[in-house]
Image (spheres, coloured by chain):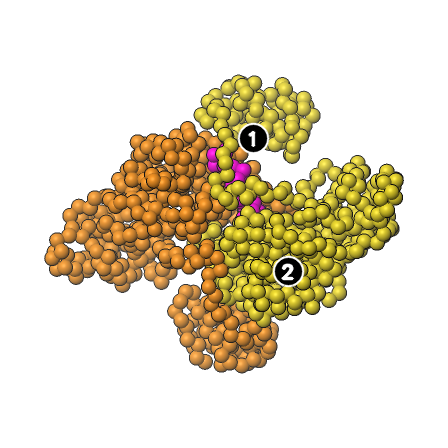
Chain colours: A yellow, B orange
Amino acid sequence: MFLPLDGDGELYLQLLRALRSAVRDGRLLAGTRLPATRALAAELKLSRNTVLAAYELLCAEQLAVARSGSGTFVADALPRHRQQPRAEPVDAQSAYAARLRRLPPLPLPTRRSDLPIDFQYGEPMTHLALFTSWSRALTHAAARAQPGYPAPQGSLHLRAQIVAHLGRRRGVACEADDVVIVNGTQQAFSVLARVLLDEGDRVVVEEPGYALAKHCLMAHGAEVVAVPVGADGLEVARLPSAPPARMIVVTPSHQFPLGVTLSLPMRQALLQHAARNGSWIVEDDYDGEFGFEGRALPALRALDAGDRVIYIGTFSKTILPSLRLGYIVCPRSLRDDIVLAKRTMDVASSGIEQQALARFMASGAFDRHLKRTALELRRRRRALNDGLAAQCGERLVPQDSGTGMHLVAWLPGFDAAAVRRLIAKAEQRGLGLHSLAPHYESTPPMQALLIGYAATSVSQIHKATCLLGESLDAVTRLGRREHETAGAGGRPRLAGVRRVARSN
Amino acid sequence: MFLPLDGDGELYLQLLRALRSAVRDGRLLAGTRLPATRALAAELKLSRNTVLAAYELLCAEQLAVARSGSGTFVADALPRHRQQPRAEPVDAQSAYAARLRRLPPLPLPTRRSDLPIDFQYGEPMTHLALFTSWSRALTHAAARAQPGYPAPQGSLHLRAQIVAHLGRRRGVACEADDVVIVNGTQQAFSVLARVLLDEGDRVVVEEPGYALAKHCLMAHGAEVVAVPVGADGLEVARLPSAPPARMIVVTPSHQFPLGVTLSLPMRQALLQHAARNGSWIVEDDYDGEFGFEGRALPALRALDAGDRVIYIGTFSKTILPSLRLGYIVCPRSLRDDIVLAKRTMDVASSGIEQQALARFMASGAFDRHLKRTALELRRRRRALNDGLAAQCGERLVPQDSGTGMHLVAWLPGFDAAAVRRLIAKAEQRGLGLHSLAPHYESTPPMQALLIGYAATSVSQIHKATCLLGESLDAVTRLGRREHETAGAGGRPRLAGVRRVARSN
């Protein structure tokens, strides 16, 4: 049977799509018996489980029927609308939808499961003990689930745990009344956009910066201004003032993606700017939990006498991305609006997951998990820095920030084409690499790699840095002539993204 | 010690607030030892667990410190900002926030845990077996959690299960590609408002109708027009046409709150109206899962040749409200915008809960739960109808719709004041009652009670209908003179909410 797989994503889904088309196009007629799973697996060189999974989904979609003992058959009567062609494209139905359609593609790396090692970033470190203790917390919470709707502001028990955690680990003093539980950082941005911004209002984001938050603000209709990040973090002197931003989004403790820290004088200047211009500061502390080598600065929120800082945090980076829970610590003056917006948007976050998280924190399991993760991340970071120094020498300049799950490695003298060649060379050797460039609005002043090490063991890091060194060799040989002709090279100005503020 | 409880909500929270104020006002000085839990419990006539819970939260908020073996002490140094007065109110910061502040209060009943029996509605029926099997599904899913972010459209496995379920139980034929997982009905409305409506666009809702959805649309800035519901459901002839509505929100299978069904001719008229005017129909099938006594009509979506119907469903009403999962079955032409809006709003719904739900459905546990629930609800509905007929006679006219978890009982001749007196009389007897009136935008044409029976056993229903009869006796004696003078009374026109469309 001719079942072409389209090569996109998981094999069982490819097979499902191929079967669906065959049924729809009439190549597989109603009532026909599908090939035995073992035979089809052999024919297509797939595992039998892949075929079983595709058949199961085909049955769930009512395109086929499994008859026990005799096999799987194409359904006799296809659901009516499947026989009609549909899906004429429509115009965007709202200004928001039109803006959604204009968003640039997301620079989020897709996990390259076909490569033996991938320096992907953005997904946290996980280990077996975490799944066990998280599963235990969930079971406990499910067995004690309350029959009613959860409170829009979030579980008081969880909010109290977050308050204690922030006080202990991030120097943030607040009360449970100031905390609103949301479904991760992204929903925090959605709620804040609704409550604080009208269409056309100006918002400052960092350049380079976190694309998904920027998309949320752009889709909302804000005028998004990207202000460069220097060695001391956001260049506060370059903030626009006529008109000033209604909202300034920063990642002060560990800038994403550059990893720099907003210095204390910059923090004070930023708070003064906000107080003078009536701007709200959104402090996104997305991965400040993993312990700093050296002294960490207090959170902006801890220095904020003027009540202009909205602190947001997430558990996606510390526990699991599939756990959609985060929080907003808000100025008291905004609290009621934020809770009402959350209720209006989706009533409340999952009650069982909130209770499980509160228990996970109260039992000490969360702190143990963070400690263990921080230790392991530190080992990996050191292995990475050592490996890069030994294998890549001067050609690649890592910028270590002493915390987090990724670092930026500058590539002096590289242009975008050379980075693409480097990535291709590494891929041939089974190593996934990712460029920093997609995190800029405009052309970056220097090319770099964004190297994540949360999903890579120390021994994989040893091997990966060797492969990276070989790939650099290959690209450098290839590109030496162009490079020498252009006279590029020399030490990069680290994090020296000197560019005037611009709108987009 | 003087610790006045404010009587609002749970006792341990009342005590927490009292302790907080005592610490903040300096009545409890830094470093002071708090009374032993047993002693304070005795003094305030509270259970010791209540005092323990309040102390634990006080510690979590860093206002007190527990020293093992020696008791709980007021913290030595209070967090800085707690010593400053804060929270100057600010103006609404956006048009959305301003609209939020203007929303009327929600008519959601609060669970009266102080009353022995409460005819509350809106929370589903739960039983021990559900918690056990749901807890098992969660444990299984947590142990197999994927490290990455869940897909914005939702788990394919879950979407395939929903497709099979809708085909089997609701006559809705669709494919997994047409389904988008969201955090319950409310998020479905938020996403659809973003994708389909600009500020000022006209939306039709039912009168009476579901307040929280209406709030979402009003906060979004839509012009919300309430169109009356008659004995055949939404009065399609009264839909506005100049300009026509961009969106029409209906609950066709079991209108909320009246319980009527949109008749087949009305369904066809509605679809024609939508096709003629380019309106989108949002079909909210909020509790169509519990099996109808008698024949159920196919969903609007199943009749929709013009691809104008967006079908939304929820698991809050069938499993647990604290499970924030629902879905949108969308026309293919809107699918990409809806998925992008969901991603932009909060990335995706909880991965573990989606997997658990998929397994819960695939294993047959969901169908068993629905069957069991439907049987028990039928028993209760019959007990309720029998009890009301026996105890309340002509004074109260129940309108049974043969499905769901609540019914409307009309009170011919009652005015709003009489309903308040009836509710007060019932409360004196330990029975919680709820008026239908808050679900109307304007004054209802006739007073009624909204009687929920999902949280009330058959034996409680027997008792409750007796208490309701006694309460009616008491009020009727009280009000007979006024009533006779006014000349009100007579058979109500069931669901005859004859009122012209108006904007709000």
Can the viewer see residue A290 in this picture? no
- Circle 1 chain: A
> Does residue A203 appear to the left or right of B193 in the view shown?
right
Q: Residue furthest front?
A: A242
Name which residue type carries label 2: Leu
Q: Can residue A275 be seen in this view?
A: yes
**Residue A435 image offset from top left, x and y in percent:** 73, 45
Which secondary structure type mostly characterizes the magenta part of the structure?
helix
Residue A286 location, x and y as percent? Answer: 64, 56
Q: Quadrant of residue B259?
A: top left
* Segment tinted magenta in the rendering: B330-352
Which residue is more in the foreground, B49 or A337?
Answer: A337
Mark 1 residue crowding within 10 angstroms, few (<14) / some (14–19) / many (20+):
some
Labels 1 and 2: the sequence-earlier one: 1
Q: Which residue is drawn at 50% across and 19% down?
A: A30
Front one among B288 and A488: A488
Identify the residue position indicated by label 1 in the image: A56
Q: Is residue B339 magenta?
A: yes
Q: Mark 2 points at which residue?
A: A239
Which chain hosts label 2? A
Q: In this view, does B35 lie above or below B209?
A: below
The one of B307 and A320 positioned closer to us in this rendering: B307
Location of residue B264 by image quarter: top left
Q: Which of B235 and A349 is in front in this view?
A: B235
Label 1, label 2: how many angstroms apart (C-alpha)? Answer: 56 Å
Query: Is residue A310 part of the magenta span, yes or no?
Result: no
- Res B239 label: none
User: Which residue does the image show at 52% across and 25% down from the upper left?
Assistant: A64
